[in-house]
Image (spheres, rainbow, N blue to C red):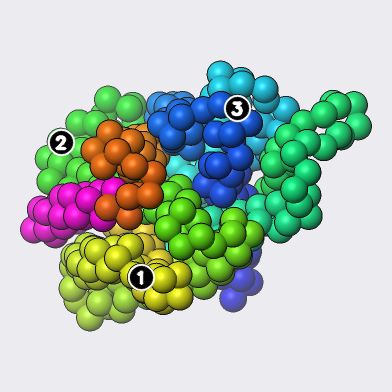
Amino acid sequence: MQKTAYSWWVVIVLTVAYIFSFIDRVILALLVEPIKRDLHLSEVEVSYLMGFSFALFYTILGIPFGWLADRANRKWIITFGIFTWSILTAGCGLVRNFWQFFFMRAGVGIGEATLSPSAYSMIADYFPKDKLARALSVYGTGIYIGSGLSMIAGSSILYMVGDSPTTVIPYFGEIFSWQLVFFYVGLPGLLIAVVMATVREPRRQGITEATPNVSFRETLAYLLPNAQSFFGITFGLGFYTMVTYSAASWVPTFLVRTYGVGKVEVGFYYGISTILMAGAGILVGGWLADHWQKRGIVNAKIRVALVGVVCFLICNLIFPLMPNFALAYLFILPTNFFASFPFGALPAAIQAMMPNQMRASSSAVGLLIINLMGMGLGTTIVAVYTQYVFGAENLIRYSLMLNSAISLSCAFVCFWIAHQAYGKSLERLAEREKS
């Protein structure tokens, strides 16, 4: 019981770190209009700050950090990362132009690249396979709690500063008022780094002194016969996140532009919806995956994703067409629920099909693809549709719908491909562990 309690304590600490990472990551979504105005940026340039600048280094450095996490002390890797991204998020409060902002966001991405590969690997060592989806679902709630809190915190700070265009802070002088948001959401992360440093590194399951280290090339070689399962899940999640990231980045702006609702109100209501509904969705998805697996359904985790993607697509084609904010918000609630539905089950599926020595590295490979697609393309594609296809900012609803229709259809195909092959991947792992 004591071991189980401590395992959940580690999950809580990692989840809080994930919450803060997402607060720092998505806070720009509430600040699109003042950033465009004060830094004289276009819609697409702002999308680069929300997505590409962060995703570039986050995804590329996930590979070496994942390789390191399969060999070194994972808690210290994460502690270093939390400290780095917290300081650089606060640094965004001092930028004066696009390129300063771009490189600060890139630095935040470098720090956050340390977290998930190491966290997935640690949690997989703390929990048995029949409880892993639930544990990773709890960790995954950090995405949605962090995204929601960023909306609520950002709107609260904007309300406090009111209409004042600039403010003065000691030692640094005058900044734009919206830049205060980055100090408030960045600096508290330093406390999380201190707590993370106290966590015990778990013993790696299935590893003995005689077990050799596995090179990154060997990890890639192991993925080849499992490509249908691994890359089906990975590219499916990539297409899925092209919609979830575009929603986190652009739905608040859609609500402001389309229904004339204030940024403060949008931040509060959308933030509450994200925390409650998306938080519930990932937990229910993880529970359902474990429940189906206990009933003997080998590919239960991927079946959860197939259910989620169909429901998510339907919701995304409805809420942008609503005639007023109240009805749009009503349909945003189930949209947020299904936005998170597979994000505990599918990372658990990957962990369950990989040898221990390859878990963090394979997760980093998956996150490279998922986040380049989600953060790199998802945040920008809606801006491209709005600016170049539909040609008017007030037509952003059609950009959201077009992105959802194309991306989620592709996600369904990928998940179906993985669904057909996943059992074989589990058999290969069992054969490897016997030898």
Q: Residue at x 40, y 31 (%)?
A: 44
Q: Answer left or right for 219 relative to 208.
A: left
Q: CA gap, disc 3 to disc 1?
A: 33 Å
Q: From the image, tell me which residue sits under label 3.
A: 39
- Few, some or many residues within 10 Å of mark 2 (<14, 14–19, 20+): few
Q: Residue at x 15, y 36 (%)?
A: 224
Res. 386 mark: none
Q: Amino acid at mark 1?
A: Pro
Residue 76 shows up from this direction: no
Q: Secondary structure at mark 2?
A: loop
**Which region of the structure is painted magenta?**
399-426
Q: Is residue 203 magenta?
A: no
Q: From the image, tell me which residue sits under label 1.
A: 323
Res. 224 mark: 2
Q: CA gap, disc 2 to disc 1?
A: 49 Å
Q: Amino acid at mark 2?
A: Leu
Magenta residues, dominant SS class: helix
Tally of numbered tags:
3
Q: Secondary structure at mark 3?
A: helix
Q: Answer left or right for 201 relative to 116.
A: right
